[in-house]
Amino acid sequence: MKSSVSIADAKGGSPLRRSIPGHMYWNMARQPSRRSVVALALSALAGVMGARSARAADPVRLVALGDSLTAGFGVGPKDAFPAKLEAALKAKGRNVAISNAGVSGDTSTGGADRLDWSVPDGTDGVIVELGANDMLRGLDPEVTRKAIGRILDGLNARNIPVLLTGMRAAPNLGPDFGERYEAVFTDYAKERGLDFYPFFLDGVAGDRALNQQDGIHPNPRGVDVIVEKILPTVERFLDRIEAGPSSP
């Protein structure tokens, strides 16, 4: 806050500053008309400070835009990734609210098609977790690249920051496919300077104890591991959101 606050004089818009010398202030205060102006100024200042406090109390509103890994396929709503991430952040004193915009079976193209209604006005940031179904269906990585680009462009046009999460390709799809597919995420993160978490299922993929019977979707313990590992990245993302658009 600036050390000197300007408040319009009721008579003509001339500035009345806090930095007025003491003897001048008290001379003005002895005059009834000036006393009224000072009272109005203090009242206005209190209103401004109250509004700022109210805004500070509002949570940072995030949307988790994803597929079944976000939606919470096979687990209860309280065990889904967005709910557990919100709880973990609140436990660390972060004032956040995370909406679950996950749709089971969704591809990156599906996420791009529903972007506008999945991310409402007032959203402060979006965690993008899409592309796993593209890989499982063997879609050309260029299709994924185009769809992720549409999502990033759409959010950028609305000045909404993004935390992008990446995915690893299954080994049976071959090294060429895997290299092209994984590059979709790393390329966008580098080119656009995004907050980036390289592998959403880090520490969980391939561990039977952390996955459901299908071997693909995490169980509640697996979701805990995902949240624990991604938490530092999300906190850095929140720091950038709270710092505002001028932050590097």
Image (cartoon, rainbow, N blue to C red):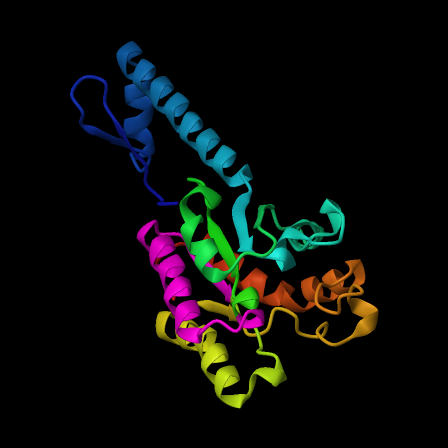
**Residue 3 drawn at (x, y percent):** 36, 44
Is residue 30 visible from the viewing direction of this image?
no
Is residue 74 visible from the viewing direction of this image?
yes
Q: What segment is highlighted magenta in the picture? A: 135-164
By secondary structure, the bulk of the magenta-drawn segment is best described as helix
Furthest residue in direction left, as rendered: 12
Q: Name the image quarter holding residue 33.
A: top left
Q: Nearer the viewer, residue 3 or 100?
A: 100
Q: Is residue 128 above or below residue 208?
A: above
Answer left or right for 155 relative to 217.
left
* Total marks placed: 0
The structure residue drawn at horizontal position 48% and vertical position 71%, both measured from the top left corner, is 139
**Residue 163 drawn at (x, y percent):** 49, 62
Q: Is residue 157 above or below residue 135?
A: above
Furthest residue in direction right, as rendered: 209
- Specify the quadrant that holds the C terminus: bottom left
Furthest residue in direction bottom, as rendered: 175
Tell me if residue 144 is in the magenta stretch: yes
